[in-house]
Image (cartoon, rainbow, N blue to C red):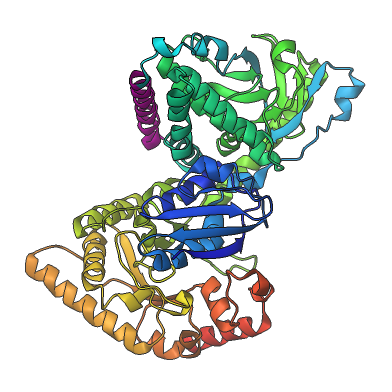
Amino acid sequence: MAVEFTFDFPMPLGLHARPAAFIQERCQDFEGEIVFENLRNGRKGEAKSILSLITSDTQYGDLCRVVVSGQGEKEFVAALKRFLVEDLKLKEEKALEQVPASTATVPRLILAEKEIYLTGQPASPGIVSGKVFLLQAGFNWESLTAGGEGSPESISLQAEKEAFSQAVSKVQQEIQRLLPQKSGVERNILQAHLSIITDRAFIDRVNELITKEKYQAKQAVYQAGREFSQLLGQAKSQYLRERMADIQDVTGRLLEQLGGQKLTRTRASLNEPAIIVAEDLFPSDFLSLNLDFVRGLILDIAGQTSHTLIMARSQAIPAVTGVTQASRRLRSGEEVILDGTRGVILISPGEAVRRYYQKEMEAEGLLLGRRQQQAALPGQTADGRKIEIAANIGRPEELEKAWRDGAEGVGIFRTELLLYGQPALPTEEDQYLLYKKVAEEASGRPVIIRTFDIGGDKPVPAMSLPQEPNPFLGYRGIRIYQENYELFRHQVRAILRATVFGQLKIMFPMVSLVEEVRWLKEKMAGFSKELQAEGLPFKEKIETGIMLEVPSVALLADKFAEEVDFFSVGSNDLIQYFLAADRSNPRVRYLNQPLNPALLRLLKGAIDLAH
């Protein structure tokens, strides 16, 4: 019997490519059926299909229903609901929060000097000057699909299906080769493209067109891509409409493989710094450029939330979009000033305007330099009180950006994220090498490794955890360690072994009782003796802490302080436990206030007790 639940969709930009890819990844290992339905418009599809999810036209606040049927459905539903309601929105890139103003602002000097200029929408802030490089990106669809239809007698259906399958594999390999070189926004976008290209709905539609309509593989890919693009084009959300470019990009890549050549797609041979001007730019076009030479972007039609412009913002490349016929009105080699902050492009500017923008660029440079210097300074308040500024990470790849942004250490390494989507649990050796890498890359900075925080509401595919009526108050965090002792043992041993490579600390989640801390410390001491007997090096003294996320810990902070070296406040869980308000329930969301006076008094009391 199927199990279902409803929820209000939580992501401000709706269900677009990246969250759809996260949902697909979360659902793909479940052997049964998962149907996602948008109750606002009645559209439904498989949760294991990224394209079915995207074309549901789901927007922020839409009431959605998920129906799960198959073995282990009850256990899976609890985890999936938590993921959709709470965890999914945490994955939204910060770049999306930085969409600039939507209209151009022309400085008065430009008007007074009667300069020749173009305007568009500011898409990525910053001011640059340089020569125009006209780029004819995208695909010549007619060339790529030429000869795509044939008579039933002239087509070998099996050969066409095999050609399509091979094209999918080749494009997969192309993207997978790029993935290790990318991080952050760029990596997420590539992973979304990887999900589209292997999407069940897309593959089934292509094979259906080959089998039933007797299309050649090229024409079937083109038609399937066109159909899914049209569905997105009908979406109410502009953000979802702009995802059409992702479908077209993936479709074009497949058609290139099926056509056996790439001459129909013009790639830039960029060997000196320039400002790129194009009608539009697919994400794969952007990633194919040498970004060291890309000073700025001027695009005719790309939306502000297109993946290309999201990547431009993540790389701090100034950009203006919506510039009418810019690719026809500007010439390669022409000198321009690109003002991505105001949405203005100056063509062959005069001396007065050059001086004006030179001062603007100098001011920007000074401000950027000051910010970079401040990022490297120790954190402290205006009255001189020092505060450690630490980053939260889920993967070692996130460390580089954390240090660049001024982090002085890692406040939480969420190790449970390493388990999501993995068919098997990591070995002690796997974890040791990972924690060793983090310790080495921290270069002496403190790193707090939180042990696996999983349970009824945070299960992993490789574990069979029981279904619970209220997983938030159930079998999670350290409460699962006794029954899953080897998982706990392997992780703690791996952390202890990695301590010799840096300043690692260990922290335990979901502690409620002093007796639990004593049990954890007793086991850690036992694991230390094991390592000593095996001749494996480790630091005998490692700082040990706990999450302060249960009110009982706050009320007995003095007793816990006798057992641990530090606390880390888990505000989300502490608020919901203290105010008896499920943070995933929209009807009581108003109670989840971090500045609630009672909560502040509780925290103040805990601080006083702990000291």
Compared to residue 453, the image places residue 222 above or below, namely above
User: Which x, y percent locates residue 92?
Assistant: 56, 50
Could you tell whether 590 is left or right of 461 in the image?
right
Pick out the residue farthest to the right: 112
- Kindly identify the residue that appears in the image at 54 percent across and 63 percent down: 86
Task: Give the main secondary structure, helix, strand or loop, of the magenta stretch.
Answer: helix
Compared to residue 288, the image places residue 431 above or below, namely below
User: Which x, y percent locates residue 239?
Assistant: 66, 40
For the question of whether residue 296 can be seen, the reply is yes
Q: Which residues are magenta?
A: 158-181
Between residues 46 and 552, which one lies in front from this camera angle?
A: 46
Could you tell whether 409 is left or right of 300 in the image?
left
Residue 516 falls in image quadrant? bottom left
- Kindly identify the residue that appears in the image at 35 percent across and 25 percent down: 170
Question: Is residue 481 shown in magenta?
Answer: no
Residue 153 falls in image quadrant? top left
User: Which x, y percent locates residue 269?
Assistant: 50, 12
Pick out the residue farthest to the front: 153
Could you tell whether 6 is left or right of 338 in the image?
left
